[in-house]
Image: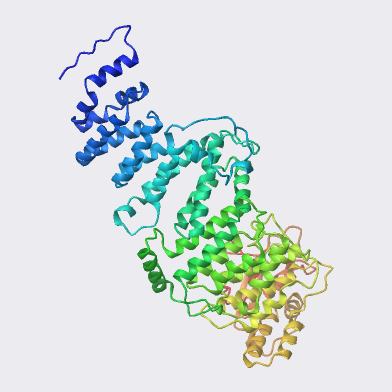
Amino acid sequence: MVIHIPISESTSKSDLAAWCTHHRLLHLLCDSHEQVIRRSCELLRFLCDADAFSLADLHVVWHAVQSNGLDVRASWLFVLEALASYMTVPVCWALLRLIQDLGVSSVSMLGLLGALAKYAPLDSYDDDIEGRAADDLLFATPNVFVERCSVRHAAMQLLWATMEDTTDVAKRMLYDTAKTQLQDAIKANVDDLLDDDSSEKWTPPVVLGCVSYLLELAVHSLTRHRNVPQAFGIVGFILTLFEDATAKRDAIAAALEARGVLQLVLDDLVQFKASYAPDNRDGSYRVDVAADGAGLAGLNARLLADGSHVDFVDHIKARLGFLSLWLNIQPTLAWRFDQLRLLWTELNEYATLGTERTMLFKWLTTNALHWNASTVSFVFQELLGNEVFLTSGALSPLSLQCFLCYFRLTNHHHGLLTLDHVAGTPTSQNQFAIHHLPLMGTSMLWTVLLRGRPTSHSHVVFVQTIKFLMLLPFKLDPELPPLNLVADGLDYLEQATDASVRSRCLTVLASIIGTDEASAAALATGDWVPHGKASRGPPLHLTVNNSIKLTATTGQRLPLDVYAHDTVLEMQVAVARKLDTAPLSTKGLRFFRMGSEIHELSRCVTLADAGFR
């Protein structure tokens, strides 16, 4: 069908729109092929621009949406999506009500909601709140975004509702799309703030109102203990958006702190653990926790029955991940000691899975540098250094590394040692120098060695602990007196009343002897000979390449005779005595084997255990 349009120079926009209405073009489109419908976006935009797309016209289109097949429905939703910024506020509101009545049941419907959340017109725009500071608008009532961008707000609410926990299989399949649409809508609504890093004024204020609305949505979820991972996802996404606008991001983080969100997060964690893992709440660091495989399957089944979109581990990860992000943005975030103890209790003492402890100790290590001195000391002395924990099966190689991290930091904050920040991550490296004695926490190391509970990983914990203990004498400033570990071990042996403690103490002493500089030197010179030559094991014939300049043997290949049961330190002392006319100190030397440096923690290991043949 060909329609002739009488257009002249005097034809106005309203004339053309009236002609379209008179000839019922919209009704003709409703009976057209779905590809024709998709090509009608410009026509309908023209009608909207000419104030010729009324509520009645919307209902004509919506009737076509409801009365045709999926292809035609998707095409009309595509067209309506393209009209989001052209329709009037009353028409947009009518469209939202129609969507609610029909139900959000397809990706196309989510696309339409996303467009309304991004581009729907504002109800009004007044300048009476222009230039107000963030403190006046974040968590303010009434919310300017809700009042002046009511359509966008309502569309975001529908997107959020589609993301909520549910057992409806069809709705669950829309979760990822709804999440993407909501994130795109958030970015579109706060985009005006991202280029200006002024923390004084937030313009336009409705944009800050959008941020406030989303934060309020997350807080509401926390207080109800519903849809919590989704809430953390929203807040984390907002904070990530402001990565380059640090002043504004800091203002948002400060508003969260003032709102008491930290305590809400921890209260929610308690509620979550009590609801889904109520069995291990006796505070005894139970070793017989369920195997991660079988235990996790049961926990996840309960979560799925309640409609959760994520599993148990991801629930814990979402909470710890948000707290890490917050600390990274706001290192001054004030944690009370009881809040840290609560986190420790829920994820360590009351752990249902080993994975919970793994995540907690990684979290504590990652955030160690964010704490002030008093907080570090509390974590070290009251939590990690607690005797019940150190003698429980919860002490694993990973938790030991966390303990050693706080051992170094605590002594650093008290001026007893200095961490070398140039040597990588000071929390995980043993690059430090000891300036004063005694060190805080040394007795805790002995507690681990003498009273640690036998478990599948206790041998690894024992070896790592004794390696660290043996390292300390080599970190002393030259003017300090020697750290006499043998004397300490003899004192513990004398005080021991339990047979197993005495046996362990003898094992520790046997490991210590020969791993200090004096005994190693005595062995090398023959001033000290172990009981029976056989105790040193079979002989090893090694070759030393000396690359140290200005020594008597620079560039030479030197033969070295040692024994398999000698320690690495004993070998190093023997090497130091052969390199020059005067014996060198091993502290200033670096040793390499097969292209790799021999780690300083290996000094107490026998040559046989270190792989020398």
User: Residue at the location (83% across, 73% down)?
Assistant: 481
Q: Quadrant of residue 463?
A: bottom right
Does residue 242 sit above or below 338 in this rendering?
A: above
Q: Nearer the viewer, residue 204 or 562?
A: 204
Q: Residue furthest left?
A: 1
Q: Is residue 123 left or right of residue 204?
A: left
Residue 274 appears in the figure? yes
Q: Quadrant of residue 506?
A: bottom right
Q: Where's the C terminus, which quadrant?
A: bottom right
Q: Residue furthest right?
A: 479
- How many marks the image carries: the answer is 0
Q: Position of residue 17 (x, y in %)?
A: 30, 19
Q: Position of residue 529 (x, y in %)?
A: 72, 86
Q: Where's the N terminus, which quadrant?
A: top left
Q: Is residue 213 left or right of residue 389?
A: left
Does residue 352 sit above or below 174 in this rendering?
A: below
Q: Position of residue 293 (x, y in %)?
A: 40, 71
Residue 566 appears in the figure? no
Q: Nearer the viewer, residue 99 or 416?
A: 99
Q: Position of residue 553 (x, y in %)?
A: 72, 63
User: Residue at the location (63% across, 88% down)?
Assistant: 534
User: Residue at the location (31% across, 57% down)?
Assistant: 168
Does residue 172 sit above or below 136 in this rendering?
A: below
Q: Is residue 167 left or right of residue 576?
A: left
User: Residue at the location (50% across, 46% down)?
Assistant: 214
